[in-house]
Image: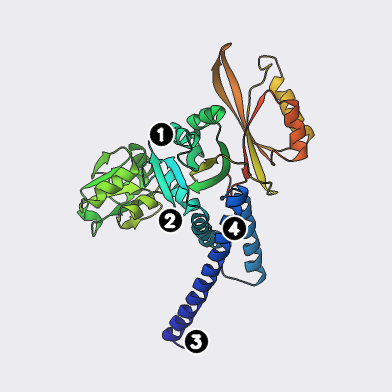
Amino acid sequence: MKSLDDCRVAIDKLDSQMLDLLNERMRVVHRVGEIKKESGGAIYRPEREKAIIDRLEAQSKEKGGLLNKSAIAAIFLEIFAVSRNLEKPELIAYLGPEGTFTHQAAESRFGAMSDYLSLGSINAVFKTLEAKRAKFGVVPIENSKDGIVGETLDLLAKSSVKIVAELYMPIHMSFVTKAKKLSDIKRIYSKDKGFGQCREFLSEHGLVNVELIPVDSTAKAAILASQDESAAAICSHIAAKLYSVPTMFENIEDEHDSSTRFVILSDFKNAISGDDKTSILVKLEDAKEAGSLVHFLKDFDDENINLSKIESRPSKGNAGFGYWFYIDFYGHVDEAHIQKVLAKHDAEVTWLGSYVKGEDEV
């Protein structure tokens, strides 16, 4: 290829070949959907998607490809989302409003083609799933700075829905505006927390004396900025995209290592992937006795089961104020050595889900 035109011709040819292959893939997917409909199989299979991405990453490395795992995942997660919609369109509920980081997390797994239902509370997401008005739900469960999301744990404790997947998403703020230059900006909208997270950026760019207007959500901030060319917003990337507000600066937060763990909820059990995590709720019958938790955890140690998290939560029952424990550990509930431990504590343990371990754990 000697010229830019030659390169464009080659790209057009490759694009046509990819389109033909994608159409061929979707025909196979359509047949998969028919088979799953007959058997009642789950449409969303995180362990299968992970296996595909891992295989393609190894293939790319072996052949000296330019695409790394992140790039392969970005491309194929969207292909998987389109495929699932061809198999069986599903509604995904999430903690809203539109343009929040939870919305961004949901779209990162279910793609732009899926149908989404924005809800006003985590409780509403659980109720919608329990009533079968949506197949999947996406809610936050933990933040690297603020810790565990207590409402999510409390609802998991009493709900019939289970965790079927997790994902870790870095929390990056964008500075978006329709203004041509910074000096044209008269007001900035965001959540009050958003201003605090981006204080250094505001100072460095001479914006500390601009009117800062707190609103209910960063999504609302993006809407207001979209309607006012002398305004800006501090918001998520997806909010800027959703409301067509140009991004002037990205990643403007003072601390760049903040991330949130989200869980995907549904009503089925995943198959064993070989790289799983399990979440349980533990209410020890002899919780007031010294060493009861240590004795419980020793059974995990005896079977070489590694814990990744243990979190105590207040539990107010008939006997008064006490505690229960939320525990994450590596492995799948159907593995024999894990079954052995859980069987010993059958009356004390509530299984909350087994799922493929998310990338980039906090």
Q: Could you say which disc has been placed on residue 121 in the image?
A: 1
Mark 4 highlights which residue? 32
Among the two numbered marks 4 and 2 on one chain, the one whose residue lies closer to the N terminus: 4
The reply to whether discs 3 and 2 touch (Cβ–Cβ < 8 Å) is no
Q: Which label sits on residue 113?
A: 2
| Dot placed on the residue nearer the N-terminal end, 3 or 2 | 3
Distance Cα–Cα, label 4 vs label 1: 35 Å
Which residue, given by chain and number where applicable, does mark 3 sit on?
A: 1
Dot 1 surroundings within 10 Å: few (below 14), some, or many (20 or more)? some
Q: CA distance from mark 4 to mark 2?
A: 19 Å
The mark lying in front, picked from 1 and 3, is 1
Residue type at mark 3: give it.
Met
- Please identify, in this view, whether the residue under mark 4 or under mark 2 is nearer the observer: 4
Q: Earlier in the sequence, mark 2 or mark 1?
A: 2
Picture coordinates of residue 310, whole percent (x, y):
62, 31
User: Dot 2, how many residues are within 10 Å of its Cα: few (below 14), some (14-19), or many (20+)?
Assistant: few
Mark positioned earlier in the residue sequence (1 or 3) = 3
Observer-side mark, 4 or 1, equals 4
Q: Amino acid at mark 2?
A: Met
Q: Nearer the viewer, mark 4 or mark 3?
A: 4
Amino acid carrying label 1: it is Ser
Report how far apart the C-alphas of labels 3 and 2 lie in the structure: 36 Å
Tell me where residue 217 appears, x and y as whole percent.
33, 40
Position of residue 157 relative to residue 267, above or below, is above
What x and y, as percent, mark residue 139?
48, 39
Please tell me whether mark 4 sits on a helix, a strand or a loop.
helix
